[in-house]
Amino acid sequence: MKLEDVTMEIRPRTDWEAVDSGFALVRRDFWRCWLLWWLSLAPVWLLIYPLQNWPWIWLLLMLWAKWVGCRMILHQLSRRLFGEQPTWSSLWREMPRAWWRRFFYRMILARFSPWKPLSAAVEELEGLRGGKYRIRMSMIARKGEGIAILLTAASCVATAWLALALLFTGLLFFPESVQDRWWSMIDAGLLWEQHSFVWLLLACVTLACSLVDGWITGAGFGLYVNSRTWTEGWDIELAFKRMANRLRQPFFVWIGLILLMSTLRISAERVDGGLSSREAIEDIKKQDDFLIHKEKYRVTPTSASLPSSPIPGLAYFLNVLGYMILALFVLVLLAGAGWLFYHSRWLRPRLSQKVVSIGKARVVMGMEVSADSLPVDLIATADALWKSGDRTRALGLLYRGSLAWWIHQAGVGIRECDTEGDCLVRVHELQHAYGSYFQTLTEAWLLGAYAQMFPSQNHWSELCGQWPFAERSLS
């Protein structure tokens, strides 16, 4: 790559100017880029006949593989920028490499990357991989990253809009009978089963992609060139190279020698005039422009102090006022610190532990646990519900009865917002002898209420037979 062979004006541009420069590159070789896009996707066109009954599969395959066409367009634009016009034979040799070069990353992992218009040039033209590619990309993306993402979104919108425009324009050239049949199928929702219409739509989408991809690729390449111009100073380097090329020409060399000889001759004439170089310098230094002037001032001790105020006593008043404000600020600061220290938890008198009477819960998890809400013979009632098939209510009655006993008799601080797990934790903290039974009952209740996994008949009989809570002690 020879920078002096570039065929575009290299200068720092704004992002939109860079996009416009990329469009100019595409306009210069539009038909060549457009033809390259179609030729590079030749394997996809060969699959039209095998997939004629599955048009949507072919569409997905085309949308996935169209990046190969963008690679070929980028190859053409990059070579053309530096004064080289690739031959068709070299382009044919490049097409297979465009399909397989870094296939897994570019065609699978980074296929839908929003930075694709900008990152593609870094990957394709510089050939970087891994960490070097990420570092280079982070530097290039400093200029034009937002526009690159906007170009990716604009390409999708422009492709959809252009495809619909081509479709509805093409429909105008069909016979009215065909149009009426298609419109009636649209009303019936059966149009997508008509393969002729679907393939017409796919043709419009393909044509739209071939037109839009060229401009988006060129815009991304313009952003890439502009970013390198800003970060690497291409314009300055190019100016120096052109200057060096001009100085290499014999004409400018002779001009330089003549100027050098004339300068030496003038210096020799000045020296031969009767004065040596040292004497000439001393003569120049004696002129008035080179005289050093010195002035001395005597500073009195009073001049180092502050200037006296035009108002008598004002400086003293301001000085006193400043000290008063400083003292007030210190007092406020000390008072605040004392208040915080006085109200800190280390100086508070420890309150004696008092038993705070809290209202006992009457409803826990939506279940009534008051004593008057339970039947007199709780076990008999629960067993009757079990035998009648209402096993959820039977287990719930046992669980409610146990909760009522823990709340009203044992004094466990169960609250209305507690869950089954919270109730079990509070009961275990009490370390009561009935705690093991309550855990067994809680597990049975959880399995039955939430998983509909009820205990067996033997287990139910054990729960009823081992019921440790007095029936009438709930009141």
Image (cartoon, grey):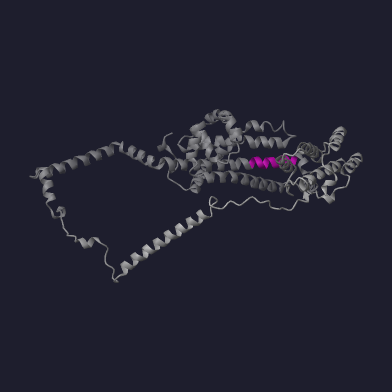
Percent coordinates x, y for residue 89 in the rendering: 53, 29
Outermost residue, left side? 274
Outermost residue, bottom side? 311
Q: Nearer the viewer, residue 237 or 426?
A: 426
Q: Nearer the viewer, residue 412 or 177?
A: 412
Name the dominant secondary structure of the magenta segment.
helix
Residue at 29% x, 68% y: name it. Answer: 309
Q: Is residue 199 magenta?
A: yes
Residue 39 visible, this orientation? no
Q: Is residue 97 left or right of residue 403?
A: left
Q: Quadrant of residue 293?
A: bottom left
Q: Nearer the viewer, residue 158 or 474?
A: 474
Percent coordinates x, y for residue 136 in the rendering: 48, 36
Q: Is residue 165 left or right of residue 374?
A: left
The span shown in magenta is 196-207
Is residue 183 placed above or below 334 in the rendered structure?
A: above
Residue at 57% x, 31% y: name it. Answer: 98
Q: Nearer the viewer, residue 172 or 405?
A: 405
Percent coordinates x, y for residue 333 in the rendering: 45, 57
Is residue 53 placed above or below 292 in the rendered structure?
A: above
Residue 193 visible, this orientation? yes
Is residue 85 placed above or below 145 in the rendered structure?
A: above
